[in-house]
Image: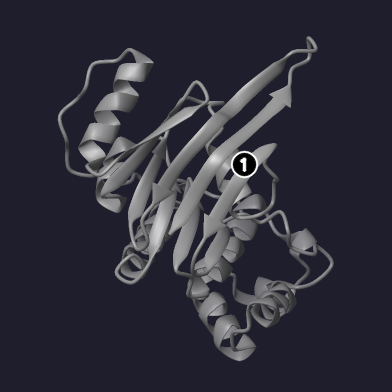
Amino acid sequence: MIRFKNLSKGFRTPGGGRKMLLSNVSLTIPSGTSVALLGRNGAGKSTLLQMIGGRISQDDGEIETTGTISWPVGHSGSFHTDMTGAQNTRFIARIYGVDSDELCDFVADFAELGAHFNLPVRTYSSGMKSRLAFGVSVGIPFDTYLVDEVTAVGDASFRAKSKGLFLDRMKTAGAIVVTHSMPEVRQLCRAGIVLNNGHMKYYDDVEEAIAAHIANLGLKKRPAAKVPQDEDEDEDS
């Protein structure tokens, strides 16, 4: 369970004003539910994820949580770049109290880094860092995963593998998912939250959340469609 109580967050604008991303919001996200977080670019979706994960503090109000919550899945900004991928993985395993050998074995196999897993992270391409970050994130069992555009990681084959593993994790965990792809929202989530002009509304039905989001954008609602097959894309290695 994640509960927001009178939550507010804003940022100063270049002109000296203040933009409120959240204005006195109170809302509860049930445990074990995969929830899409929808809103315009700049609405504050990624900021809210980082607030839930403890990376950013709110201006006012409280965030109450139960169970374990991941950092935003795929976020690679906290790696020590002079340490190897394996060393970073072992360090994170110790922080979260999981078996370091098991997590290293999982990440080495899943992230497909080969010999690079034992090289400093500063030598990695952005794609390699993302694969390492995703592998470490989902390799640790959390009660709730925070997910920010996770299916954009890697080439088509890796994205398909990542999505399959994430769906498997959702059998026993909840998630808050940020993605601009409505087919992915429909595939990954069964409920939704719409963030608009500093306010949030929770919908038990993800289709109602999608409809409200599209209405906020001033677009016409398209019918649900099957998730298209990803086209192959090149990635730096």
Instruction: Report x, y in % for residue 15.
Output: 78, 9
Describe residue 185's horizontal placement relative to residue 75 as left or right: left
Describe residue 83's horizontal placement relative to residue 135 as left or right: right
Instruction: Report x, y in % for residue 46.
Output: 56, 40
Q: Secondary structure at mark 1?
A: strand
Position of residue 19 relative to residue 206, above or below, is: above
Q: Quadrant of the C terminus?
A: bottom right
Query: Residue most toward the right?
Result: 82
Residue 60: which quarter of the image? top right
Choose between 14 and 183: the one closer to the eye: 14
Position of residue 81 relative to residue 59, above or below, is: below
Choose between 16 and 152: the one closer to the eye: 16
Residue at image point 69% right, 77% down: 95
Position of residue 199 relative to residue 175, above or below, is: above
Structural crowding at the residue carrying mark 1, measured as other residues with C-alpha within 10 Å and reported as few (<14), some (14–19) or many (≥20): some
Residue 10: which quarter of the image? top right
Instruction: Report x, y in % for residue 198.
Output: 52, 25
Residue at image point 70% right, 72% down: 85
Q: Does residue 234 appear anywhere in the picture?
A: no
Residue type at numbered disc 1: Gly
Instruction: Report x, y in % for residue 25.
Output: 51, 34
Describe residue 231's horizontal placement relative to residue 4 as left or right: left
Count of numbered marks: 1
- Asked which colour scheme the image uses, the reply is one colour
Residue tagged 1 = 61
Q: Quadrant of the N terminus?
A: bottom left
Choose between 64 and 135: the one closer to the eye: 64
Query: Residue most toward the top?
Result: 15
Residue 96: which quarter of the image? bottom right
Q: Does residue 98 appear anywhere in the picture?
A: yes
